[in-house]
């Protein structure tokens, strides 16, 4: 297989023991430690076809990754197809669309679109791949105004499980499945998606002592339903280590951060944010003001390096007393490995998708909660899993039972990311496009029997 690939693809091929293999085999999420027999990095779609066909012919398991943020499993001894070289981005400002390769990141797209005053429906991290983010649904700073990234997908080019090139366009079942169906229906090589006329915004981030967190959380829960669709707010509870590189007001403390963006004029933004900021009081660090969309990348914490981590993801209808108390108890307990809890407000266009929207859900939830135990080791993972399971048990009576696919790391809960009727349709389409379940090392949807 190696010899045949070396002669058939533009790009790179790595074998165990060769220079570069240890770097390209590893995903960003280090909970998986794959040892593939070969890592292929094709530079174009024909190379992707060659890799898929070669893996099938050799009877080897095939897994796919771009940046590796969503890598959940990868078989030892199989073939790892790395799409990171497919990183070209083209912008058509007249049509307000972008075309990006599967390995492009949101940073690549924003660099190309910002000069035209256009913005994609990117996420909070510029380092994540466009492909994986969009296939999982994709929710970001403009989601309440314009919807999920998956809703903006207009066309996609994929290589199917047989190694054939396919184009999924408007009205096709395959495009519907790609709008939130994970990597089950083909290896994405190129996406075309809408851009939006957003450049000047109002936003920022500010941090507050944890003893004000209860008041801020309550105000957030009470006023969120009244928020304009232009406003997106994210609250983050963080327990920070006592490190000299951290700002002194935050060092070694538990704090609450407000991260917010308003896609509109400053006077409207200040009015929309006033109830929450009045409840919050004076921050110990940070603030809000005019900004460009490209600057939203700095609102999140600096993107961490590759690491072992464990997460909990859930959806709730309200920030009730019991939800607030559970989250605050977790973040203030210095024995807990859970040091980050993120609460996002949904609604707006996220709850009112276009008629041709895909299966990405949940649409009707008011808030999402993600709790993270970062920077773990093999020895500390079991304790973190136990702690997160305990938190999940406390929150369970308040949750909707659904989860958003991009936030979900537990592949045994993939079904919870879809409505039952959508999951059934995806399983039927899987039988058509990948009856042998070749593309299964993901949030897998087995083909309907």
Image (tube, helix red, strand yellow):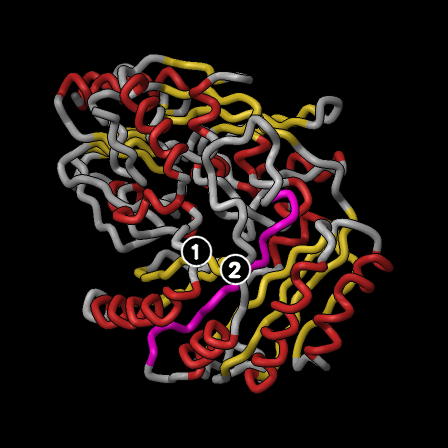
Relative vertical location of residue 161 with respect to residue 325 in this rendering, above or below: above
Left or right: 401 as drawn, with respect to 378: right
Q: Is residue 240 at least partly visible in the picture?
A: no
Which residues fall within the magenta stretch?
Answer: 336-350
- SS at mark 1? loop
Q: Position of residue 449 (x, y in %)?
A: 20, 24
Q: Position of residue 68 (x, y in %)?
A: 36, 44
Residue drawn at x 39%, y 38% is 66
Left or right: 273 as drawn, with respect to 303: right
Q: Does the CB distance between marks 1 and 2 fall below 8 Å?
A: yes
Numbered tag placed on residue 317 in the rendering = 2
**Which of the pair 224/388 is nearer the observer?**
224
Relative vertical location of residue 278 with respect to residue 41 in this rendering, above or below: below
Indicate the quadrant where residue 99 lies. top right
Q: Position of residue 296 (x, y in %)?
A: 65, 54
Magenta span includes 341: yes
Numbered tag placed on residue 202 in the rendering = none
**Which of the pair 356/440 is nearer the observer?**
356
Indicate the quadrant where residue 338 lies. bottom left
> Tag 1: Cα neighbours inside 10 Å, few (<14), some, or many (≥20)?
some
Left or right: 293 as drawn, with respect to 19: right
Residue drawn at x 38%, y 84% is 334
Residue drawn at x 43%, y 65% is 398
Quadrant of the rendering where the N terminus is positioned: top left
Magenta span includes 74: no
Left or right: 94 as drawn, with respect to 52: right
Q: Position of residue 390 (x, y in %)?
A: 30, 71
- SS at mark 2? loop
Give the number of callouts: 2
Residue drawn at x 41%, y 51% is 403
Residue named by callout 1? 400
Label located before the other in sequence (1 or 2) = 2
């Amino acid at each position: 297989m190696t010899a045949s690939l070396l002669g058939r693809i533009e790009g790179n091929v790595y074998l165990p023991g060769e220079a570069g293999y240890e770097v390209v085999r590893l995903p960003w999420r280090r909970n998986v430690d794959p040892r593939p027999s070969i890592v292929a990095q094709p530079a174009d779609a024909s190379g992707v076809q060659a890799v898929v066909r070669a893996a099938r012919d050799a009877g080897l398991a095939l897994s796919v990754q771009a940046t590796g943020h969503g890598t959940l499993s990868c078989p030892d001894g199989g073939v790892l197809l790395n799409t990171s070289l497919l990183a070209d981005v083209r912008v058509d400002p007249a049509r307000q669309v972008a075309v990006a390769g599967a390995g492009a990141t949101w940073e690549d797209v924003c660099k190309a679109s910002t000069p035209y005053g256009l913005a994609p429906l990117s996420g909070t991290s510029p380092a994540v791949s466009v492909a994986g983010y969009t296939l999982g649904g994709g929710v970001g700073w403009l989601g309440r105004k314009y919807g999920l990234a998956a809703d903006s997908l207009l066309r996609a080019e994929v290589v199917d499980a047989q190694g054939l090139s396919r184009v999924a366009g408007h009205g096709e079942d395959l495009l519907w499945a790609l709008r939130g169906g994970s990597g089950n229906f083909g290896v994405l090589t190129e996406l075309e998606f809408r851009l939006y006329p957003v450049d000047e915004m109002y936003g920022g981030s500010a941090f507050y002592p944890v003893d004000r967190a209860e008041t801020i959380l309550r105000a957030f829960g009470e006023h969120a339903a009244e928020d304009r669709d232009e406003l997106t707010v994210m609250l983050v509870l963080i327990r920070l280590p006592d490190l000299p590189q951290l700002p002194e007001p935050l060092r070694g403390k538990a704090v609450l951060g407000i991260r917010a963006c308003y896609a509109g004029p400053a006077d409207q933004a200040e009015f929309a944010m006033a109830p929450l900021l009045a409840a919050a009081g004076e921050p110990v660090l940070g603030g809000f003001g005019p900004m460009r969309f490209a600057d939203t990348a700095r609102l999140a914490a600096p993107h961490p390096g590759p690491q072992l981590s464990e997460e909990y993801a859930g959806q709730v209808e309200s920030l009730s007393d019991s939800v607030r108390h559970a989250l605050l108890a977790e973040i203030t307990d210095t024995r807990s490995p859970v040091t980050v809890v993120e609460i996002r407000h949904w609604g707006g266009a996220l709850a009112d998708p276009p008629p041709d929207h895909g299966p990405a859900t949940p649409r009707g939830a008011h808030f999402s909660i993600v709790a993270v135990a970062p920077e773990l080791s093999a020895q500390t993972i079991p304790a973190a899993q136990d702690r997160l399971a305990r938190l999940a048990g406390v929150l369970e009576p308040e949750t909707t039972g659904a989860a958003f696919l991009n936030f979900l790391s537990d592949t045994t809960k993939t079904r919870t990311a879809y409505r039952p009727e959508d999951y059934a349709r995806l399983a039927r389409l899987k039988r058509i496009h990948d009856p042998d379940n070749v593309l299964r090392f993901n949030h897998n949807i087995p083909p309907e029997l």
